[in-house]
Image: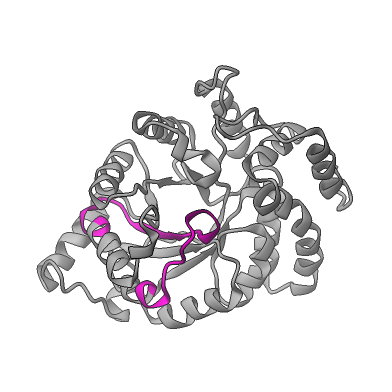
Amino acid sequence: MLGVGAVKKMFALSRANYGNTLWKRTASQAAGQRLDISGIYPPIATPFTEKEELDYHKLEENLQKYAQIPFKGLVVQGSNGEYPYLTEEERVEVVSRVRLSLPRDKLVMAGSGCESTRATVQMTERMAGVGADVVLVVTPCFYKGKMDSRALTHHFTQVADSSPVPVVLYSVPANTGLELPMDAVCRLAQHPNIVGLKDSGGDITRIGLAVHKTRALDFQVLAGSAGFLLAAYSVGAVGGVCALANVLGRQLCELQHLCVEGRWEEARELQWRLIEPNAAVTRKLGVPALKQAMEWFGFHGGSCRSPLQPITESEAQQLRRDFSSNGWL
C-alpha cells in the first residue's frame, strides 16, 4: 500500500515531467505505482444519540466488529454515512476516529466531496491530514445542468492535483441526478493521482465499458452496490462499496472470493439471495432501513439525523421479509 509520502513523491515527479496541466499517463508509467483498492468496503453508517449527536461509543463498537471481517477497508462519510447532514468538523472527526481504531492493514476511504472545487480541495486535505488512505469524491450536483464533461473534468483534476492521497471518482446518479460522463472518466483515468471509479448507477454495460476503455491505465472500477456485484466482477470490476456489507459483510466478502476464484455457479447462488435485501436497504427504503437491519444483526444502527425519518412499521415488516425469505433472518 502506498503511503501519503510515496503518493506525494510520485505526484511531484509526475508534475515535473508533464507540467501543471499535461498529466497524461502511459501504461508503463502506471505499473507498480497505483494503490490497490480491490476488495469489499462497507460504506459505514454514522450512529447518533437520541438527541442526534454523534455517538462515538457506538461507532467504536461497530468498528471493532468490522475489523474482524475480511474487508479491504471502510468507506467513511459516503452516502450511507449521512455526510450531507454532518458539519465539516464532524466529517473530519469521524474519519479521524475510524483511522485511529481500524487496523493499519485496512484502508480508510474517506468521502471528501463538496459542492465547490475549492471546498472539496480543502476537505480532501483535511481528510488526508487525519489519516485517510484514499478519498472518494462525489460529483458536485447542485447546478447539475452545468455539470458537463468539461466542468467535471476540471473539478476532479483540480482536486487530484492538490490531494496528498489517491482519489476515487464517485458516480451516484440516484442521489445526484447526474452520471459522470464516460469521456470524462476516460480522461481522468490518465491522471496519476486518480486510481479508480465507484459506479453506483447499476448499468453493467457502462461498468464494462469503463473497464475496457481504461484497462491499459491500471484504472480500477468498484461496483457501488451488492445487487450487481457479481455482474460487475464478470466485466472486470475489482471490488465493491456495498451498503449491504454493513449487515452481511462476511457474505459479501465470500461473494468476492467466489468471483475472483471463478466459481461462478456458487457465486450466482449467493448473489441471488442478496438481491432483495440489498434493494430494501438501498433504493427502496434507504439509510433508515439499513440502520434498522444493522440492529437486527448485532450492529449499532439507530436513528438517522433529521430530516430523515425512521421506517414505518409496515416498512419494517417488509424489510424483515426481504431478509428472512432469503434465509438471513
Residue 328 in sight here? no
Q: On the picture, is 318 further left or further right than 258?
A: right
Region in magenta: 159-185
The x, y position of residue 53, in whole percent, is 50, 20
* Observer-nearest of 6 and 182: 182
Q: On the picture, is 249 further left or further right than 325?
A: left
Residue 122 is inside the magenta segment: no
Q: Is residue 215 above or below residue 254?
A: below
The x, y position of residue 60, in whole percent, is 54, 27
Image quarter in which the N terminus is found: bottom left
Give me the residue at 46% from left, 59% from top.
Answer: 37
Give me the residue at 33% from left, 56% from top.
Answer: 166
Q: Is residue 263 above or below residue 223?
A: below
Figure colour scheme: one colour
The number of numbered badges drawn on the structure is 0
Give me the residue at 58% from left, 38% from top.
Answer: 67
* Observer-nearest of 114 and 148: 148
The x, y position of residue 170, in whole percent, is 44, 59
